[in-house]
Amino acid sequence: MAFDKEKILINAQKYVLKGQSEKAIKEYQKLVKASPRDIRSHLKLGDLFLKNVENEKAIGEYMRVAELYVEEDLSSRAISIYKKVLSIDPRRIEALHRIANLYLKEGLKGDARNYYHSILKVRPNDQEALNALRTIEDHHVPKEPPKKVPPSEHAPVKHHHSPETRIAEETIIPPSPPAVIPSDAPPDPEISSVDKDAEMHYHLGIAYKEMELYDYAISEFELASSSTPITFDCYIMLGDCFMQKGDLDKSIEHYRTASELKGLPDEKLARLHFNLGCAYEANGMASEALDAFTLVLKLDHSISEAEEKIRRLQNSGRN
């Protein structure tokens, strides 16, 4: 019998809508067996396992998805999935290592350091984390030439702790949450570390948004919004995420904040006010929506969707 992917997917979605998760899981298992690199099916399977409180099976699916993203050199998406694993099991060493290594690969040493310290909270003698921290510190702290001191004045200082013990002892700071702390690594010659961090957070937000993990996406866009070059885009994304969550008041708030930014070209303003108009319309604010769509046409006559929105709002107002 030939494998009918479309039919199996339809059956899986039907079972999901009916709340029959066990049957849906069996259908998605057929899909990933036939297409082991099908990221969406692995993700959906992980979500179903998580809903059934089968956490280890869910983690297995998410780890597989992250590996596929790494193979495709999509570091931001891989990190977002590893973070989802940590939201289920914050002490998952493998996920902590993978995130730290990916941040190090991206040159975000501050974020990598944060996760290596988290590893040492769980496993104080983890040699990979200890070695990585030692390498990061060697590159981070500029070495000063030793001062010449007369032997009679200062006796040699003996260190009673090995480097490994010293680094482990430094990790008595409170454990860091899965959310990352902005990097304090030295600035790159062409782009500051703050900009690199903001860019990484922005791409993480995009990855979370595409996976409909809106709460995670919102956290990343909020972190990225501090970087002026992408502040506008972050506020637009925040507005979109809150709209998807059904929180229309916050969606409108972020769109309005974006509209207050100075020096925006008409093209961006048109896009912004169209989104704002949609949020107003969904929130039952017909008058405000009509004003927003009218402004869209003044900024860009080519947006035909705004004309349709205006006609519909005017017709509904007459009824």
Image (cartoon, grey):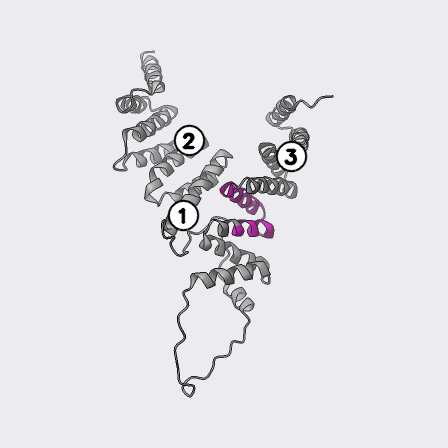
Please tell me whether mark 3 sits on a helix, a strand or a loop.
loop
Please tell me whether mark 2 sits on a helix, a strand or a loop.
helix
Q: Amino acid at mark 1?
A: Lys
- Asked whether 261 or 186 is in front, the reply is 186
Please tell me whether mark 1 sits on a helix, a strand or a loop.
helix
Residue 276 vs 82, above or below: the answer is above
Q: Amino acid at mark 3?
A: Pro
To which residue does mark 2 refer? 243
Q: Which mark is residue 36?
A: 3
Dot 3, how many residues are within 10 Å of its Cα: few (below 14), some (14-19), or many (20+)?
A: some
SS majority, magenta: helix
Residue 214, horizontal then vertical, whole percent: 47, 36
In the rendered structure, which segment of residues is drawn in magenta? 74-101
Dot 1, how many residues are within 10 Å of its Cα: few (below 14), some (14-19), or many (20+)?
A: many
Cα separation, mark 3 vs mark 1, equals 33 Å
Residue 90 in sight here? no
Q: How many marks?
A: 3
To which residue does mark 1 refer? 196
- Of marks 3 and 1, which one's residue comes earlier in the chain? 3
Which of discs 1 and 2 lies nearer the camera? The answer is 1
Residue 158, horizontal then vertical, whole percent: 51, 79
- Of marks 3 and 2, which one's residue comes earlier in the chain? 3
Q: Are marks 3 and 2 in contact (CB under 8 Å)?
A: no
Is residue 308 found left or right of 33 in the rendered image?
left
Q: Residue at x 45, y 51 (%)?
A: 108
- Asked whether 96 or 177 is in front, the reply is 96
Q: Is residue 277 magenta?
A: no
Cα separation, mark 3 vs mark 2, equals 34 Å
- Of marks 1 and 2, which one's residue comes earlier in the chain? 1
